[in-house]
Amino acid sequence: MQNSKLLFMLVICLALMIALVSGQDPEPGTTGPQATLTPPLKVRVGTDGLAYVWIPPGTFQMGCSPDDNECQDDEKPAHQVTITRGFWMGQTEVTVEAYKRFAAATGRGMPPEPMLVDRSLNPGWIQGSQPIMGVTWDDAAAYSRWAGGRLPTEAEWEYAARSGTSAARYGVLVEIAWYADNSGKSRLDSASIVTGGNITSQIEQYARRMIANENGPRVVGRKAPNAWGLYDMLGNACEWVADWYLRDYFLKSPAEDPQGPDLNEETKLPTSQHVLRGGSWYNLPRALRASNRGWLVSGPYRREFYVGFRCVLGNPLPPQKRPTN
Ligand SMILES: [Ca+2]
Ligand SMILES: [Ca+2]
């Protein structure tokens, strides 16, 4: 274990040195690893070959951040949540390379390439260091089990993303995240792309602009990490979490280790849907906030070209204490 840790650190150092010595600029607009930030206290390599960072237990304010005027109703009310058990969280989104190992080991196969209209975002899955995207929730859960873990709960995800910060974002957006403004060949003001028309034509206008500007996902771990050493919690791939989505869940979620509503008892929805967190390379800045909640209709079987995940290892979740009222 110690040896594999050492080896991992060596590989990382070597990769850094090569990148520095060769003077490569991996991608336009890339800030590169942030050597000046506090390194994470504890990192380990999972059996899936990805790095995992230790997230200590603690208490935080979940939901709409103070002074955040972009919150939607489902982010309210802000409420105190305690995560009673620490866990290891993927330092990056699950990569294409790691997912290929899973697909080969389990015979599950790769998902269809993520397509933005008629453009493949990763032709032939050649970009191994980009996040896997276009996976269903079931795919993500199966990967997590294979890696010896599970998907994070929505509360664990937000707690880890905030990493002790209370603002809507854990840093300056352009320094920490890939999103619609900076994930293409030229800088865009994505909020001004859509100028009018009905919703269908607005979606088309937006997609056309993204295609014309060659926007797309990026190699994981190239923007600045948060204080706990996690990369791309905001942006790049939008991330599946374990919980079912319920719009008003924050009104009644338990104060300790919330794990989402019970599907049958509480959501009463014609189709099930899981929560998505963090926004993606395709999204406007307002989607990239620590408390923003997304979802996809048609639940576990839906794939989207901007949706990936990361998983957590370690402690199983405690039994959920549901409020009694
Ligand atoms: Ca992400
Ligand atoms: Ca939302």
Image (cartoon, grey):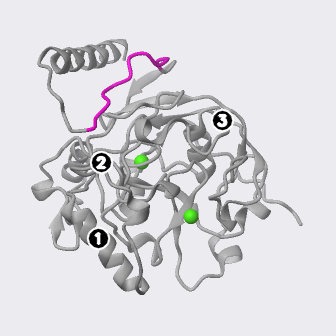
Along the polypeptide, which appears first: circle 2 or circle 1? 2
Instruction: List the residue tagged with mark 2.
Output: 131
Ligand 1 within 8 Å, label 3 CB: no
Image vertical order of residue 297 relative to residue 95, above or below? below
Q: Main secondary structure of the magenta part?
A: loop
Which circle marks residue 85 in the picture? 3
Circle 2/circle 3 CB separation < 8 Å: no
Along the polypeptide, which appears first: circle 2 or circle 3? 3
Q: Quadrant of the C terminus?
A: bottom right
Along the polypeptide, which appears first: circle 1 or circle 3? 3
Residue 114 appears in the picture as rendered: no
Membership of 88 in magenta stretch: no
- Give the camera-side residue of 243 and 149: 243
Residue 69 appears in the picture as rendered: yes
SS state under label 2:
loop
Q: Is residue 105 left or right of residue 225?
A: left
Position of residue 298 measured from the top left corner of the image (x, y, whole percent): 45, 78
SS state under label 1:
helix
- Residue at image position (37%, 84%) is 200
Residue 118 found in image quarter: bottom left
For mark 1, does the 10 Å Cα neighbourhood hold few (<14), some (14 to 19), or many (20 or more) residues?
Answer: some
Ligand 1 within 8 Å, label 2 CB: yes
Image vertical order of residue 280 relative to residue 312, above or below? below
Position of residue 69 measured from the top left corner of the image (x, y, whole percent): 67, 56
| Gap in angstroms between the C-alphas marked 1 and 3 | 41 Å
Which circle marks residue 207 in the picture? 1
